[in-house]
Image: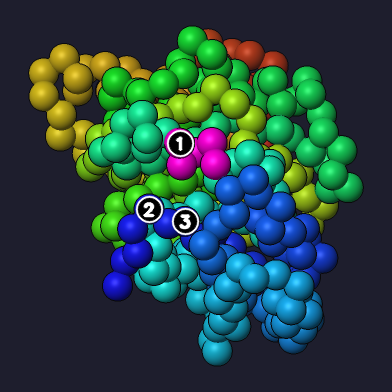
C-alpha cells in the first residue's frame, strides 16, 4: 500500500558501516524528515546490522533494514529497495554519499509547484573520502552534467536529461511508481552502467523532470569500491555500449536532436571506454571503439589517440 505525499530514503550498502552511518545520519538531520529509511545490505558480516540496530534507538524515524540472505549485487539491491518502499516518493542515496539538510524539503517542494512531476534533483558537491568539499571540482561536475542556473526548472525533453546525464546517479527524488516501472536492468545487460541506463530509460519513457538550482547532496570520491556504477572502473565502457545499442523511437525533429546528443555523449565516453576495454582484455571491442565514428580521426590523431593505438597494438603482441 502506497502512502500519500511521503518520502523514503533508500540506501543500498555493502561492507561499509562507517560511511553508511554518515549517510543515514544525513537523512536524520533533514529539515523535513523522511517518513522512513530503507536499507538493503549486501554485506558479508554483521557490522552494518549492529550499527543500525544501535542507531535505530536514537530516532523516531523508522529504519527498515534488511540484510540480503544472498548477495543481490548493486542492481538487484536497488530494485529490492524500490519494491520495499511504501511511500509515494523516494530518494536513492548511495552509502558513501550524504544529503544536505535541505534535500528532502527542497526536492519535495518541486511537486508543490508542478504536481505531476516524475523526478526532481539538485546540484552535487564533490567531497574527498574524508568529507572535504572541493568547490572547483563541484563546479566542474555540475557544468559537465548540465546542472547550471540557465538549465533550472522543468526540463523540456525527457530524453535529454538521460542522454546528457543531467539526471544524477543518486540523490534524486522520484515518484515510487516510476522507479518501480523503470527499474535497474541486470548486471549481465548493463554491467556497472546501471545508474546511467536507469536515467536514460526513465527519460525516454516519462515526462516531468525538474532541475532545482540548489545543492542538495555531497558526492564522495571514495578510496575503495563504490555502490555507484559511475565510480567503478568500467562505467564508461558500459555506458558507451548502452548508447551504442540504444533504439530511439522519437518523432521527427526530436529523434534528430537525440541522435546528435547521443553522438556527442559517445564521443565524450569513447577514450575512457576504449582504455577500459583494453584493461579488461576485450581486444575486439577495443578495436571497434577505436575505429568508430565516436572515436573519430581527430581523436585518433591526438597524443591520447596515439597512446591508445600503441596500447592496442601491444595487446596483439601479447596474444
Magenta segment: does it hold 305?
A: no
- Mark 1 to mark 2 CA distance (whole Å): 11 Å
- Mark 3 to mark 2 CA distance (whole Å): 7 Å
Instruction: Give me the disc on residue 225.
Output: none
Instruction: Give me the disc on residue 5.
Output: 2
Instruction: Return the residue at label 3.
Output: 7
**Number of disc labels:** 3
Query: Which residues are drawn in magenta?
Result: 105-109
Quarter of image, res 186: bottom left
Q: Is residue 84 above or below residue 178?
A: below
Residue 162 percent coordinates (x, y)? 38, 34
Residue 87 percent coordinates (x, y)? 40, 62
Instruction: Return the residue at label 1.
Output: 109
Q: Residues within 10 Å of mark 2 (few under 14, many from 20)?
A: few
Most extreme residue toward the bottom is: 69
Residue in view at x 15 percent, y 34 percent: 249
Residue 262 percent coordinates (x, y)? 36, 26
Q: Report the side of 13 relative to 8 (left or right).
A: right
Residue in view at x 60 percent, y 73 percent: 63
Q: Earlier in the sequence, mark 1 or mark 2?
A: 2
Q: Report the side of 6 relative to 171 (left or right).
A: left
Residue 55 percent coordinates (x, y)? 76, 74
Circles 3 and 2: CB atoms closer than 8 Å: no
- Mark 3 to mark 1 CA distance (whole Å): 12 Å
Q: Residues within 10 Å of mark 3 (few under 14, many from 20)?
A: many
Q: Earlier in the sequence, mark 3 or mark 1?
A: 3
Q: Dividing the image into 4 quarters, which one contains the C terminus?
A: bottom right
Q: Nearer the viewer, residue 122 or 251?
A: 122
Quarter of image, res 84: bottom left
Amino acid at each position: 500500500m502506497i502512502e500519500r505525499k511521503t518520502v523514503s530514503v533508500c540506501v543500498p550498502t555493502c561492507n561499509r558501516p562507517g560511511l553508511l552511518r554518515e549517510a543515514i545520519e544525513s537523512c536524520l538531520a533533514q529539515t523535513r524528515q523522511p517518513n522512513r529509511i530503507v536499507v538493503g545490505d549486501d554485506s558479508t558480516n554483521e557490522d552494518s546490522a549492529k550499527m543500525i540496530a544501535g542507531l535505530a534507538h536514537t530516532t523516531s524515524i523508522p529504519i527498515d533494514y534488511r540484510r540480503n540472505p544472498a548477495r543481490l549485487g548493486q542492481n538487484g539491491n536497488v530494485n529490492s529497495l524500490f519494491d520495499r518502499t511504501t511511500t509515494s516518493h523516494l530518494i536513492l542515496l548511495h552509502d558513501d554519499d550524504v544529503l544536505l539538510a535541505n534535500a528532502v524539503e527542497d526536492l519535495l517542494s518541486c511537486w508543490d509547484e508542478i504536481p505531476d512531476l516524475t523526478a526532481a534533483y539538485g546540484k552535487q558537491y564533490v567531497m574527498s573520502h574524508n568529507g572535504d568539499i572541493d568547490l572547483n571540482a563541484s563546479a566542474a561536475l555540475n557544468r559537465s552534467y548540465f546542472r547550471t542556473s540557465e538549465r533550472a526548472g522543468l526540463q523540456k525533453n525527457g530524453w535529454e536529461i538521460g542522454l546528457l546525464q543531467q539526471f544524477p546517479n543518486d540523490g534524486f527524488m522520484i515518484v515510487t511508481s516510476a522507479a518501480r516501472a523503470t527499474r535497474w536492468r541486470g548486471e549481465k545487460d548493463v554491467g556497472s552502467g546501471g545508474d546511467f541506463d536507469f536515467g536514460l530509460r526513465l527519460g525516454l519513457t516519462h515526462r516531468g523532470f525538474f532541475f532545482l538550482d540548489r545543492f542538495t547532496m555531497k558526492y564522495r570520491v571514495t578510496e575503495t569500491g563504490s555502490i555507484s556504477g559511475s565510480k567503478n572502473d568500467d562505467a564508461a565502457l558500459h555506458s558507451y555500449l548502452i548508447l551504442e545499442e540504444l533504439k530511439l523511437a522519437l518523432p521527427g525533429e526530436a529523434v534528430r536532436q537525440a541522435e546528435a546528443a547521443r553522438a556527442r555523449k559517445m564521443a565524450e565516453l569513447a577514450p575512457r571506454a576504449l582504455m577500459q576495454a583494453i584493461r579488461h582484455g576485450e581486444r575486439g571491442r577495443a578495436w571497434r571503439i577505436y575505429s568508430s565514428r565516436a572515436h573519430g580521426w581527430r581523436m585518433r590523431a591526438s597524443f591520447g589517440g596515439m597512446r591508445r593505438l600503441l596500447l592496442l597494438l601491444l595487446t596483439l603482441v601479447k596474444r
